[in-house]
Image: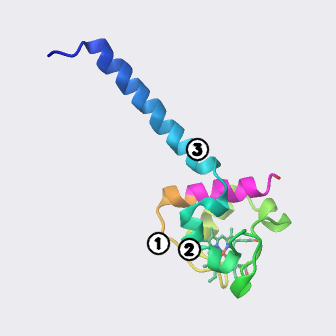
């Protein structure tokens, strides 16, 4: 059976929207439910991202709030003092999502 052209066009449009939706919903989810955070960051910054173990500071702080997204995009892959580097461990998409989620922690 030959599928009419317009149905193909409509369903690919729908698919594109669905993909956008998945991406935005991933970054609007809270930082503390992001498996990337739980696996890599919670051991130092705490399960609630308010800091605790191994000297990891709270990420919901005045200081992080005052840090620009560009600086955060730089700190996560490159590290800072005792904060380890993540450049080889995380993809840039994962780091982008973390930065957006860290920023939204500080909007409250
Ligand atoms: C080994 C413990 C450790 C792990 C794991 C860790 N951090 Fe950190 N992090 C630190 C420490 C310690 C600092 C403070 C660095 C400084 O300014 O002296 C820090 C600082 C930061 C800062 C900057 C805070 C500020 O106020 O300037 C951000 C943002 C951050 N970490 C995010 C993350 C993210 C995201 C992850 C997971 C990908 C992560 N960290 C994993 C220990 C850790």
Residue at horizontal 42%, vertical 26%? 14
In this rendering, would 43 be left or right of 56? left
Residue extending farthest right:
62
Judge: label 1 CB < 8 Å from ligand 1: yes
> Residue 52's x, y, as percent?
75, 81
Dot 2 surroundings within 10 Å: few (below 14), some, or many (20 or more)? Answer: few
Residue highlighted by disc 1: 89
**CA distance separating discs 1 and 3:** 23 Å
Q: Which region of the structure is painted magenta?
A: 96-107
Residue at horizontal 54%, vertical 65%? 36
Vertically, is 71 above or below 57? above
Q: What secondary structure is found at the residue carrying circle 3?
A: helix
- Which of pointers 1 and 3 lies earlier in the amino acid sequence? 3
Judge: label 2 CB < 8 Å from ligand 1: yes
Vertically, is 74 above or below 42? above
Residue 73: in magenta span: no
Q: Quadrant of residue 8?
A: top left
> Residue 33's x, y, as percent?
62, 60
Residue 25 marker: 3
Eye-nearest disc, 1 or 2: 2
Residue 104: in magenta span: yes
Eye-nearest disc, 1 or 3: 3
Q: Quadrant of residue 74?
A: bottom right
Q: What secondary structure is found at the residue carrying circle 1?
A: loop
Question: Circles 1 and 2: CB distance less than 8 Å?
Answer: yes
Residue highlighted by disc 2: 40
**CA distance separating discs 2 and 3:** 21 Å
Residue at horizontal 72%, vertical 55%? 103
Q: In which quarter of the image is residue 16?
A: top left
> Residue 6's x, y, as percent?
31, 13
């Amino acid at each position: 059976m030959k599928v009419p052209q317009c149905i193909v066009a409509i369903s690919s449009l729908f698919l594109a929207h669905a993909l956008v939706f998945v991406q935005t919903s991933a970054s609007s989810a809270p930082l503390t439910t992001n498996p990337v955070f739980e696996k890599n960051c919670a051991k130092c910054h705490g399960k609630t991202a308010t800091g605790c173990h191994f000297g990891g500071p709270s990420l919901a702080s005045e200081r992080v709030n005052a840090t620009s997204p560009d600086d955060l995009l730089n700190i996560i892959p490159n590290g800072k003092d005792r904060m380890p580097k993540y450049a080889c461990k995380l993809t840039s998409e994962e780091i982008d999502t973390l930065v957006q989620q860290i920023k939204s922690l500080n909007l409250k």
